[in-house]
Amino acid sequence: MLTGKRVRIRAKGKIFEGIVMPSFTGSLVLKLENGYNAGFREYEIIEVLEDFRAQVPRAEIVRREDLPNVKIISTGGTIASRVDYRTGAVTSQFTAEEIVSDVPEIAEICNVEAELLYNILSENMKPSYWIELARRVYESLKKYEGVIVTHGTDTMHYSASALAFMLSTPKPVVFVGAQRSSDRPSSDAAMNLICSAKLATSDVGEVLVCMHGTTSDEFCYAHRGVKVRKMHTSRRDAFQSINAKPVAKIDYPSLEIEWLSWRYRRGERELKLRDRLEEKVALVKFYPGLGSDIIDYYHSKGYRGFVIEGTGLGHVSTDWIETLKKVCEDSIVVMTSQCLYGRICDRVYDTGRDLLRAGVIEGEDMLPEVALVKLMFLLGNYSLEEAKELVKKNFVGEIEPRSTY
């Protein structure tokens, strides 16, 4: 079996060298030095050079007294992924130390200690994992000048929002991911990580997400953890601030930071942790014809927090009104919008006014996912009546005082 081995072959009158990938078509598939895959039906193997799978990279972390100390906590995801030469798929399989070894530029920015907390793809993230992550970050902030959390991009905005509510931090906590794994020539992993290291040593004091600002390697944006969303499946600039400016722009490769929308500076808040979450909170996307029995079902299962992605200014069918009125007696129902941009205003149309009279709370300009996490946090730490009042309060920048976008 040649899979996973580096070979040199002759094909099409040329010499090619690369790592043999799994193939289900009968062709020989090589991952070439430039990172791209090439398939060959007719070829001659000249030499088998080495078994690539046996090479395990090791980090060499050299501490410098003149640099700040930063903790990297790895949870997995594409930024921590390489090709699995057994299957040919991209999987999360190397540690935080190995991430640092692949990006030696970080050693010029800060001293790094790395910890592998989880080795999962982001679709496997859970609220219970957020709690453990928040605890680890909290302990790390006592010792380090900043914390970087490497995370899969698909649910990174959920996790960043969760930590923004659970942690009062006087130092930077920077979530970073990659849209393309580090063994691809178009990978964004190294640049994102370098920019996140610069942020982690900066003067900001809140939870941020650091990702490419454009499809080119020009700069990264730092987004507030409660105002960011993944807006494209594969583009490198998939993450965007919604209803708010990014917090900062980090030029590359100069790493100069342009601050755009400060909220908390380093040292302004005391370090605090509130690590309780109520998991029985539902996010329901309304669509034409959806019956209110879905709310009844969750309610019957003990759910007391509901976020509805309504249409436009925050609407659902008038058929829902009586159900929502009943549910609002012992639960919290927050209305958000599928539009994402803009603000909920249930005072314009009759349906909206009926929703308000039923007890539904306007979600202002909160993203649906942020409202979900916020309800988990509030119901985990406050009484139902307190939570109903506090959901309208701006805790960490999740609600803009006025809409300008």
Image (cartoon, rainbow, N blue to C red):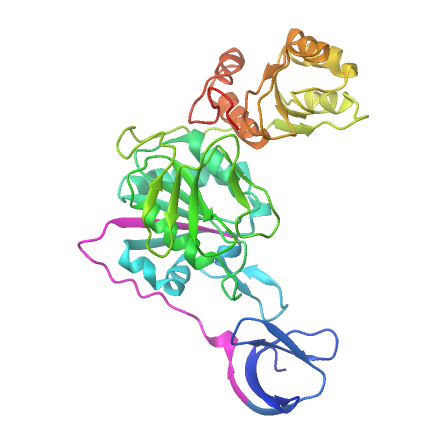
Residue toward you, 265 or 13: 13
Q: Is residue 363 above or below residue 161?
A: above
Q: Which residue occupies 76% across, 20% down?
A: 292
Furthest residue in direction right, as rendered: 289
Q: Which residue occupies 57% across, 67% down?
A: 84
Q: Quadrant of the N terminus?
A: bottom right
Quarter assignment of residue 55 = bottom left
Drawn side of residue 68 relative to residue 49, left or right:
left
Magenta-highlighted residues: 48-77
Furthest residue in direction left, as rendered: 65
**Residue 65 locus on image (x, y percent):** 17, 55
The verdict on residue 95 being magenta is no
Quarter assignment of residue 173 = top left
Residue toward you, 240 or 390: 240
Quarter assignment of residue 295 = top right
**Residue 18 locus on image (x, y percent):** 55, 80
Q: Is residue 187 visible?
A: yes
Furthest residue in direction top, as rendered: 357
**Residue 347 locus on image (x, y percent):** 64, 10
